[in-house]
Amino acid sequence: MEPLPIIVVHQGNSPYLEICLRQARRTNPHSRIIWLHGEADSPLDFVECYCFQEPELSQDVAFFSSIYQHLSSSNSREAERFCIQRWLNVRNFMRCENLSRCLAIDSDVLIFCDVTQEAERFRPYAMTFAHWNATQNLIHCNFIQNISALESFTDYLLKVYQDSELLERVKLTSRKKRNRYRVSDMSLFYDWSVHSDFHFCFFEDLYSDAVFFDSCIDFVQDFQAIHYLPGFFRPFKKITWKDGLPHGTLKNGLPAPMKCIHYHGFLKFLMPFHFQQRSPHVKIFRLLLQQKWTNFPAKWQRMWNRLWKDE
């Protein structure tokens, strides 16, 4: 089998990005590790760097930016738009490189498996998702098995903000409290997928077969969790190490060997520990307290802004 390329789209050069890329190389030494970036160059000699602002990789991006409507109270306009338009960059790169398949991962994901081998598991499917909730698909670890599916989704992106009925359909399933919305790439992937003829796999459907691609490390419904100061910190999956691989533990006590882990939001600070195969409880607790204190003023300001706007 030809090794499956691994693609990461990320602006800037955050410390956790390097950890993501190093872990991808560690577990997939024969795969192309590709970073689509805005300006920075990678100091890592095993990473292929391509600027997504180059003409061949930015096809349709300017047009998408001109029609985009910001309908998310959870992210800034720039961040949300980038999260959506990056799929145009991935499509354009696959076209340029004549790739029919790839694995596209977020920069806050650590891979712990041979993705070429795992891709065979998903041969019948066009893409892989996880559940964020009932109306949003997580696409942090997307085995794109059919470029035609990605082409279909990007065609949808170029249509949805120009079709008022279609956009209203998306808004209806993305409505939050107080007449706010979360129209994101997750909700757009959901709306497109349920109205598509392609077949998709959800990682949670594989749990019964003991195949665990993590949705989010703080999605703990079926797992034993670490919960420092309940009500103050969100719990996250308890991770232990065996033969160099991370294992969660199901609530029934059975081990759950993890194929990947997704470090959502502020829990990115766990990535260096898990890259080193460590879970030091005291240090993690101290860092959680530090982050809580550092982020408190900004969180309070966001809450105040929302209350003021609602009034």
Image (cartoon, helix red, strand yellow):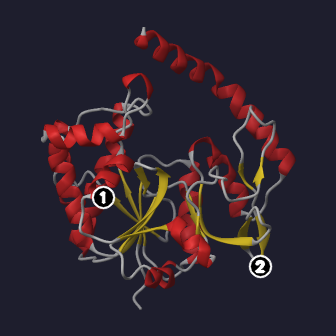
Instruction: Tell me what residue is drawn at x 49 percent, y 13 percent.
Output: 307
Q: Which mark is residue 57?
A: none
Q: Earlier in the sequence, mark 1 or mark 2?
A: 1
Label 1: which residue? 194
Q: Element under label 2?
A: loop
Query: What is the quadrant of the C terminus in the image?
Result: top left
Picture coordinates of residue 241 (x, y %)?
78, 69
Label 2: which residue? 243
Judge by depth and name the residue closer to the eye, 118 or 177: 177
Is 12 on the left or on the right of 221, as rendered? left
* Residue 62 visible in rendering: no
Query: What is the quadrant of the N terminus in the image?
Result: bottom left
Judge by depth and name the residue closer to the eye, 268 or 45: 268
**Amino acid type, residue under disc 1 in the picture:** Val
Q: Element under label 1?
A: helix
Picture coordinates of residue 309 (x, y %)?
41, 12
Q: Residues within 10 Å of mark 2 (few under 14, many from 20)?
A: few
Quarter where residue 229 is shown? top right
Instruction: Tell me what residue is drawn at x 78 percent, y 46 percent.
Output: 284
**Amino acid type, residue under disc 2 in the picture:** Asp
